[in-house]
Image: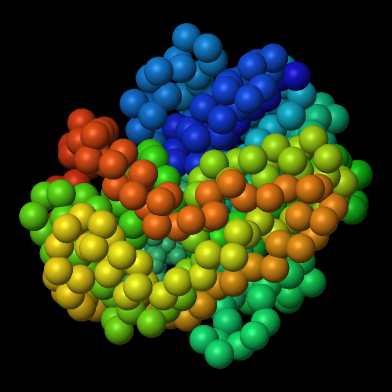
Amino acid sequence: MKLLVTGGAGFIGANLVHHTLATRPQHEVTVIDALTYAANEASLASVRDKITFVQGSITNTELVDKLISETDLVVHFAAESHNDNSLNDPSPFIQTNLVGTYTILEAVRKHGKKLHHISTDEVYGDLELDDPAKFTDQTPYNPSSPYSSTKAGSDLLVRAWVRSFGIHATISNCYNNYGPYQHVEKMIPRQITNILTGIKPKLYGAGQNVRDWIHVDDHNAAVWAIIEKGTSGATYLIGADGEQNNKAVFELILELMGKPVDWYDHVNDRAGHDMRYAIDATKLRNELGWTPQYTNFRDGLQATIDWYADNEAWWKPLKAAVEANYAKRGQ
Ligand code: NAD
Ligand code: DAU
């Protein structure tokens, strides 16, 4: 099968490329990536001779049309992905997440190809801390930020193209991923690399917000289960029951890195900060037989810390600019 991975030089996309070459070497992989600030070509350096890499935007109609005409399946990761950036300037989020997804859908429709659309649990908004409920595929959409609202819009476009034009597409919504190759703007790599460079970790607000953490390899294994066994038009929620509040995650990172567990600063909170995410992944587990492999968060986090400690050349050039941006916002 010929596979087109959009956003394959980003965090989850690059991990999907590695995962695919390791587990399904029979497939031919092409990556399209605009190489925005969030991409890192070094993430694909070790496999560049095994894939085709195209630098370009998913909003480029001609390029997307050509690449999709030559593929069997599109796995669509490309997006502007950071909530804090979307609060600063929503415009690239509108372009990539909405117009880019529309551009892909039109080419998929024209050429009769398959699509798997990667989305987020943030389309459902947030939950109260004491709410026993978790998100399911029946939860109404209620996004909070420019990022999550553009992701919600992109999901709805996919659903409309399935219903009205009969394209073959599946959607998955996953929560917070961690693991190697994640940009240092995101919470876990930011704090690990802060500690590695002698900076105190920066906790937003009181740190009571809860995120549900999944290892990126478990996410990508679920994506493959959906591609291979999912039903067109269906939405699958991917989650591994990893709820933790931010303060607890900070304390664990500090403990694993040999620092006092209170060695962090409280900084300005995020505007409109979602309180809690939690996913009920029963449908994925029961219908497709997927189960997570990284069930011990402490071990997965330790491996991630080791990866950042061993791969300074991958993240060090990005660090100062990211921290300068955060400092402007008092974060
Ligand atoms: P990322 O920011 O690390 O990578 C995004 C990639 O997309 C980058 O390589 C970037 O260059 C590329 N890109 C951006 N605009 C583009 C454009 N116009 N054309 C082509 N390429 C473009 O993001 P990520 O964390 O790997 O997230 C990937 C996908 O997974 C996103 O759709 C995101 O919404 C979704 N998601 C992420 C998480 C998470 O925890 N990171 C959780 C659930 C869902
Ligand atoms: O739930 C899925 C989403 O997870 C994805 O759709 C997004 O692409 C991905 O970025 C992530 O979104 P979050 O906003 O939850 O992730 P982030 O890493 O930015 O922040 C995680 C939590 O940590 C959040 O409650 C804010 C807090 N935080 C973040 C940073 C960067 C801090 O306390 N300090 C920080 O320095």
Residue drawn at 60 percent across, 41 percent down:
220
Q: Check the image and report above or below for 42 versus 283.
A: above
Q: Position of residue 53 (x, y in %)?
A: 50, 19
For ligand 2, the image quadrant comes to bottom left
Looking at the image, which is closer to me, 150 or 207? 207
Is residue 145 visible in the rendered image? The answer is no
Q: Position of residue 89 (x, y in %)?
A: 37, 61
Residue drawn at 24 percent across, 53 percent down:
192
Looking at the image, which is closer to me, 14 or 280? 280
Quadrant for residue 38, please give it: top left
In which quadrant will I find the C terminus? bottom left
Q: Is residue 168 left or right of residue 277?
A: right
Q: Check the image and report above or below for 3 versus 166.
A: above
Q: Is residue 231 left or right of residue 153?
A: right
Q: Position of residue 317 (x, y in %)?
A: 18, 37
Residue drawn at 14 percent across, 69 percent down:
260
Quadrant for residue 314, please give it: top left
Looking at the image, which is closer to me, 85 or 98? 85
Quadrant for residue 26, please give it: top right
Residue drawn at 39 percent across, 29 percent down:
43
Q: Position of residue 79 (x, y in %)?
A: 52, 47
Residue at the extreme bottom of the image, as rendered: 130
Q: Is residue 313 left or right of residue 26?
A: left
